[in-house]
C-alpha cells in the first residue's frame, strides 16, 4: 500500500500531476486485494494450482499490514469478492444471479471481518502466526453461521494436490488451512524484513519453514494399506436425461437410469468382464420416488438389486404422511429388501429447506420450487454391507468436519459420499466437492466412494489418490477393490480440539494487539 493511504500526517497541497499520481497509487492496494482473492480462487479445483494460495496470502498480508480497521475491512471485502464470486458462480446455474450474488457477498463480508482481525494482529510480533489463526477462526464462523454455516471455500479444500495435505491427518482441515495461510503470511514477512535491510529474518523464515517441515513429518500418517483386508465396491452413475434445476421432474427416468446401469453391471459380472462387487452404492436422489409409498419404484429398485445380488445403498426422497421430507439413504438387501436408513443431517438452506421463506420470496420466486421442506436426521449413518461398514456422508455434508468425523467414529471402514450435482450442470462445483472428498480420505485414512448422478463419480484411496473416475453426464459403473481400515488418525481422535486451539490462539493475538494499541495510546502525548 502506498504511504499516502497509511499515514495520518497532514501534507501540503501538491500540483495536479502529483495529486493524480497519488490518486492512482490509492488504487494499487485495492487492486492487489482483489487479485489476492482471484489467486485463491485459481488455487481451487479443477486447476491443480494449489500453490497459488501462498502468493495470495503474501499479497493479502501486504495490503493488510498495519492497516486501520475500516480500511482493512474494505480491502478484505474486495479480497473476499475476488475469491467467492468466481468460486460460487455455480450457485446461480439455474436460478439466476441473485442467489449467487447474495451468497458470495455474505461469505465475502465474513472474510472481510477476518481480514480486519488479521490487520489488527500485524501490530505485534509474530503476526503471521496470530493472523493465520484469525483466518481459521473466521473459517470456523463461516462453517457455522448463518443458517448452519457454509464451509465452501475453506483453504484446506483447495489443497488436495498440495504438499501440506498430510497435515489433515494431524489436525483436520483447520490445521491444514492454518499451515497454508501461515506460510503465505510468512513469505510476506520474510520479504518485508529483507526489504527493510534485516539480513537474518530468522523468526519470519520459521513461519515458512515450520509448516513445510510439519507437512513432511506428517507423511507417515498417510497410509493406504489394508488393515482389515479389502472389499470390491461398485459405484453407479446412472446419469440424468437433462441437466438443470428441473431434473427432479424426471424422477422416474433418473431411477430407471440407475436401475438399468446396475442390471448392465450384473450382466457384465456374469459374462466375466468385471469382478462381482461385494456391495454397490447409488447417488443421492437416484430415486426421488419414495419406494415405501410407490410400489412401482419399489419394484424397479428391488429387481435391480436382485440382479446384482449384493447389498445396494439407494439415495431416495422419503415423504412421510406428516412432517418434513427426508433425504434418505436406504440399505437394500437382495433378499430382504430395505433393511436400514440414514437421513441426511446437514441439509442445505435455500435448497432443501427455505429459512425465512416470506423474506426470501421478495428476492427470488424460485424459493417456491421447494414446496415442502426437508428435515435433518439425528444420528450418523453406517451400513454393514457384506461385512464392510460403509459410512454415509450425503453430498453437502462432506463440507462439514463433524459430519464426516462422527461417521468414522461410529465405525465406518469406508466412506461413501452420495451426491447429486445435476442441478449445477458442467460447472466446477463437482470438482470442488470431489477435492473435499480427497481431503477427507487423508484426514481420516479411509477409502472414499463418490457416487454422483451425472458426474464426476470417483473411487478415492486413503492417501487421497483418485484411482477411478467417470466423465460428466455419462452412465458408468466403477468397480474397484479398496483397502479397509479401522485405525483412527490423530485428526479423528482429536476432533474439533485443533480448531478450538487455533481459535484460542487467535484470541491471544487479538488480545495482545489490543493491549499493545492501548499502551501506545497512553504513551502518546
Image (cartoon, rainbow, N blue to C red):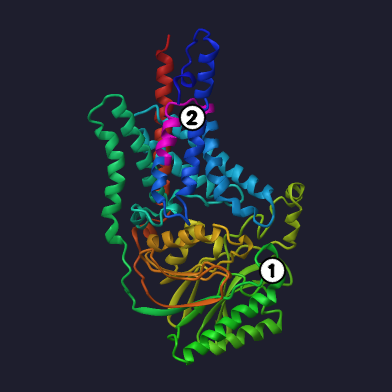
Which label sits on residue 503?
none
Q: Quadrant of the C terminus?
A: top left
Q: Residue at x 35, y 42 (%)?
A: 183
Q: Is residue 108 above or below residue 361?
A: above
In this rendering, the answer to whether 317 lies above or below 118 is below
State if disc 2 and disc 1 touch (CB < 8 Å). no
Residue lying at 33% horizontally and 69% vertically, measured from the top left: 224
Asked whether residue 113 is in view, the answer is: no
Any mark on residue 29, and which? 2
Say which of marks 1 and 2 sits in front.
2
Residue at x 27% of width, y 34% of height = 203
Q: Helix, strand, or loop for circle 2? A: helix
SS assignment for the magenta stretch, majority: helix
Question: Residue 9, position in %: x, y?
Answer: 47, 12
Report the quarter where the N terminus lies.
top left
Residue 204 placed where, x, y %?
29, 34
Residue lying at the far bottom of the rendered structure: 270
User: Can you tell which quarter of the image residue 422 is in?
Assistant: bottom right
* Residue 27 position in % (x across, y down): 52, 27
Report the side of 432 relative to 504 (left or right): right
- Image quarter of residue 334: bottom right
SS at mark 1 in the image: helix
Residue placed under numbered mark 1 in the picture: 248
Percent from the top left, x then y, of residue 366?
A: 74, 55
Magenta span: 56-72
Task: Mark 2: give few (<14), some (14-19) or many (20+) Cα within 10 Å.
Answer: some
Q: Nearer the viewer, residue 329 or 438?
A: 438
Amino acid at each position: 500500500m502506498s504511504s499516502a493511504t497509511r499515514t495520518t500526517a497532514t501534507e501540503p497541497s501538491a500540483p495536479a500531476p502529483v495529486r493524480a499520481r497519488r490518486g492512482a497509487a490509492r488504487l494499487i492496494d485495492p487492486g492487489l486485494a482483489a487479485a489476492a482473492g482471484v489467486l485463491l480462487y485459481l488455487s481451487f479445483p479443477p486447476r491443480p494450482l494449489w500453490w497459488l494460495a501462498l502468493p495470495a496470502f503474501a499479497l493479502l498480508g501486504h495490503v493488510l499490514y498495519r492497516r486501520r480497521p475500516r480500511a482493512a475491512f474494505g480491502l478484505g471485502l474486495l479480497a473476499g469478492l475476488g475469491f467467492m464470486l468466481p468460486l460460487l458462480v455455480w450457485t446461480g446455474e439455474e436460478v439466476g444471479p441473485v442467489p449467487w450474488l447474495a451468497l458470495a457477498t455474505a461469505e465475502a463480508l465474513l472474510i472481510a471481518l477476518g481480514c480486519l482481525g488479521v490487520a489488527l494482529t500485524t501490530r505485534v510480533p509474530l503476526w503471521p502466526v496470530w493472523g493465520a489463526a484469525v483466518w481459521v477462526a473466521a473459517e470456523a464462523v463461516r462453517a457455522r453461521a448463518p443458517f448452519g454455516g457454509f464451509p465452501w471455500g475453506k483453504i484446506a479444500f483447495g489443497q488436495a494436490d498440495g504438499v501440506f495435505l498430510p497435515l489433515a491427518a494431524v489436525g483436520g482441515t483447520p490445521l491444514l488451512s492454518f499451515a497454508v495461510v501461515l506460510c503465505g503470511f510468512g513469505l510476506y514477512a520474510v520479504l518485508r524484513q529483507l526489504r527493510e535491510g534485516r539480513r537474518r529474518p530468522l523468526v519470519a523464515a520459521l513461519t515458512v519453514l515450520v509448516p513445510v517441515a510439519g507437512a513432511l513429518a506428517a507423511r507417515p500418517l498417510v497410509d493406504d494399506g489394508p488393515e482389515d483386508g479389502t472389499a470390491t465396491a461398485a459405484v453407479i452413475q446412472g446419469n440424468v436425461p437433462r441437466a438443470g434445476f428441473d431434473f427432479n421432474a424426471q424422477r422416474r427416468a433418473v431411477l430407471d437410469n440407475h436401475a438399468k446401469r446396475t442390471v448392465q453391471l450384473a450382466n457384465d459380472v456374469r459374462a466375466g468382464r468385471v469382478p462381482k462387487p461385494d456391495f454397490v452404492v447409488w447417488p443421492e436422489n437416484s430415486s426421488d420416488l419414495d419406494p415405501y409409498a410407490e410400489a412401482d419404484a419399489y419394484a424397479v429398485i428391488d429387481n435391480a438389486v436382485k440382479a446384482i445380488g449384493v447389498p445396494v445403498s439407494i439415495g431416495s426422497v422419503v415423504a412421510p404422511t406428516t412432517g418434513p421430507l427426508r433425504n434418505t439413504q436406504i440399505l437394500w438387501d437382495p433378499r430382504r429388501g430395505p433393511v436400514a436408513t440414514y437421513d441426511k443431517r446437514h441439509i442445505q438452506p435455500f435448497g432443501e429447506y427455505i429459512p425465512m421463506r416470506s423474506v426470501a420470496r421478495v428476492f427470488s420466486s424460485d424459493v417456491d420450487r421447494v414446496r415442502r421442506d426437508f428435515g435433518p436426521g439425528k444420528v450418523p449413518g453406517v451400513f454393514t454391507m457384506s461385512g464392510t461398514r460403509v459410512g454415509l456422508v450425503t453430498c453437502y455434508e462432506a463440507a462439514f468436519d463433524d459430519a464426516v468425523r462422527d461417521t468414522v467414529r461410529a465405525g465406518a471402514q469406508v466412506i461413501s459420499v452420495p451426491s447429486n450435482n445435476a442441478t449445477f450442470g458442467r460447472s466446477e462445483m463437482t470438482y470442488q466437492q470431489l477435492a473435499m472428498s480427497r481431503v477427507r480420505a487423508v484426514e481420516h485414512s479411509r477409502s472414499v466412494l463418490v457416487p454422483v448422478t451425472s458426474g464426476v463419480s470417483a473411487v478415492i484411496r486413503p492417501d487421497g489418490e483418485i484411482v477411478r473416475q467417470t466423465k460428466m453426464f455419462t452412465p458408468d459403473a466403477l468397480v474397484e477393490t479398496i483397502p479397509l481400515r479401522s485405525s483412527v488418525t490423530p485428526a479423528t481422535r482429536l476432533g474439533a480440539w485443533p480448531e478450538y486451539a487455533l481459535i484460542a490462539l487467535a484470541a491471544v493475538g487479538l488480545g495482545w494487539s489490543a493491549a499493545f494499541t492501548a499502551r501506545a495510546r497512553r504513551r502518546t502525548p
